[in-house]
Amino acid sequence: MSKLLSKTMRLCALTLTVGYLTLSVTPLPAIAQTAPAAFTIGDNGIAYFNFAIDEDKLGGAPDRSAMNQALDAGSRIFVRNGHFYRVGPDNRPNTADDARVRLYGINLSFSANFPSDADAVRLAQRLRKLGINAVRLHHMDTSPGTQDNPPRSLLTPGPYPTFNPVAVSRLRNFIDALKQQGIYVDLNLHVGYRFRPAVDQLPPLDGKNEATPLGAPVHVYYPRMVALQEDYARQLIRALGLRNNPALAMVEINNESSLLAAWQRREWTEAVPRAYEAELRKQWQEWLVRRYGSTTKACTTWNTCVSSSSVVPLLTPTDASQIGQWRDRLDGKFKSLTAKVLGPTDPGTPNTSGEALRVRDFLLFLADTDRAYFNRLRQVVQSETDVLVPVTGTQMGYGGVLNFDSQAQMDYIDEHFYIDHPDFPGPAWDRNDWRIRNSAASDGELNRLLALSLRRDIRKPFVVSEYNQPFPNKQGSEIQPLMAAIGAAQDWDGLFFFDYMDGDNWAATPSAFTLAGDWSKYAATGQSAMLFRNGLVGTLQKQTGALRQSPPCAIQAPLKRIYRCATASRRNSPRKRDWAWT
């Protein structure tokens, strides 16, 4: 979109070439220096040129439809040798006709998941033309309501899970339309649903809050919440007809949330409301008994308990940071005392006693609690679909290095990545109060992009299920080809742009995260899909791996390092952050 800054400026004509927007500047006679009808006057008095692409009529070289074929039984995806494969014509995994597949996908959010019958076909055809072969069905549980034209959620305001039959019917029809266009789905289970004590028959929350905070992992450990999520998953999978359905590529259990993440991000109060604390403390005692034989033996090993016969309290991130400060104060003057009270200082020396060992054990407890939740939901998913369906727990940035432990039984690794995600100085997601840095992926942010390799497990497929460089970042059009090139070179398995659209209407102008209407990004989508899916950038030949100690080195390090390793590197938005070693 170009601006007409004044009547005396030369007007610019926009031309769409194959995959690129180019400007051709043509001087016009002075008599013509007035805004033509194609311009719209904005609220600021500036005339804007309305540029749009008719996606339904897109054809010729930009049309990548030929990359997709309708999905059949042989298209079912499974994991083999650390990557995604199709089972092939014989419909059996791990045979000679298996074929490697990479997923170049896009997110749909809220109402976009529930198009009408006519719009379902239209949208599926649009995405196919872009070279998209997977759709991430996202934020389907976030906004329960009664709206049904279109629905905004799978859920109604009734007790969880009460399904909206119109939404379920539309989504099932949409999945069928996607399947005909050769497009898989990534089913997201828990994303934004906030449990409501008064409605869902749960203990009260602190401050008489009506619902759990977004992302707070109370639902990871509280038994009734876990059972309700099992019921939700079973009912949804059955209602959508996903058993042995080749359209189902993968399932995500819990978006951007875990107990490890709550510790890491110092969101512990939200994770453990007072009425729920007793349940988590009970599970902590049980974990200690399994590990040490009794809580008394645990206290004796740590040499830190006030009374070895009392209930061992839960720890908080503040406990760990205070211990790190104590070490700083004591080191140098009372080194032997420091080691005795807090644990050894050598990163290579296992902590055998002291406060550092207690913190280590607590972090391992959190990882095991996350793991039990992930494993339980994975078992439900695969019992309702089939054992081939790849399942993941949450994103690696939401828990850090210990997620390798908590997701040991998961089938693939998932991550999110944003360049210049908006910051919100005031209320979160305030459309009128946000900041960006106008940073570039190809400049100062490139190291963060390359560092995604540190989150991989060589034995499993690697997927980035959200990425973007949102509007109005001026370099935003670089993100898709750059991600596609690096993903192909590093042999990743899936990329999902966030998102195509999330509203009730078809977008025609740029808006934050959406691809529809952001034509500078749109023009690069087809080429990026072809580059990644077809391996036009070859996989790097040299592979460098690192053996991980068990327990992880972060847990064997001194307390100060433990805390830092378990703490997020704070950058970008409160919900789209990165973790890093320090």
Image (spheres, rainbow, N blue to C red):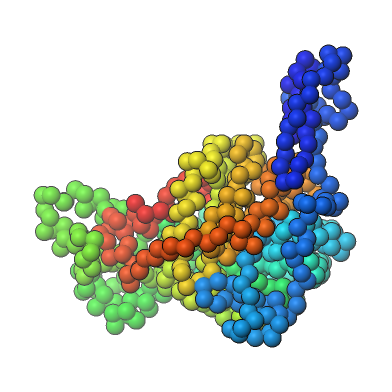
Which residue is depicted at the point 87% across and 14% down? 31
Q: Is residue 52 above or below residue 207?
A: above
Total label count?
Answer: 0
485, 567: nearer the viewer: 485
Q: Residue at x 84, y 47 (%)?
A: 54
Residue at 45% across, 48% down = 447
Residue 209 screen position, x and y as percent? 57, 56
Question: Where is residue 417 shown, x and y percent of the image?
Answer: 54, 53
Question: Which quadrant would residue 339 be assigned to in this image?
Answer: bottom left
- Using the image as rendered, state which of residue 292 and residue 412 is in the foreground: 412
Direction from residue 113 to residue 431 in the image, left or right = left
Q: Is residue 217 left or right of residue 106?
A: left
Q: Is residue 90 above or below residue 166?
A: below
Q: Quadrant of residue 246?
A: bottom right
Q: Quadrant of the N terminus?
A: top right
Residue 559 visible? The answer is: yes
From this view, report whether residue 274 is shown above or below residue 504.
below
Residue nearest the observer in this picture, 170 or 47: 47
Please state the horizontal and vertical placement of residue 203, each as a whole percent of the image.
54, 67
Q: Position of residue 211 (x, y in %)?
A: 60, 59
**195 relative to 28 in the view: left or right:** left
Q: Residue at (38%, 58%) from the top-left corner?
A: 566
Whether residue 218 can be seen here:
no
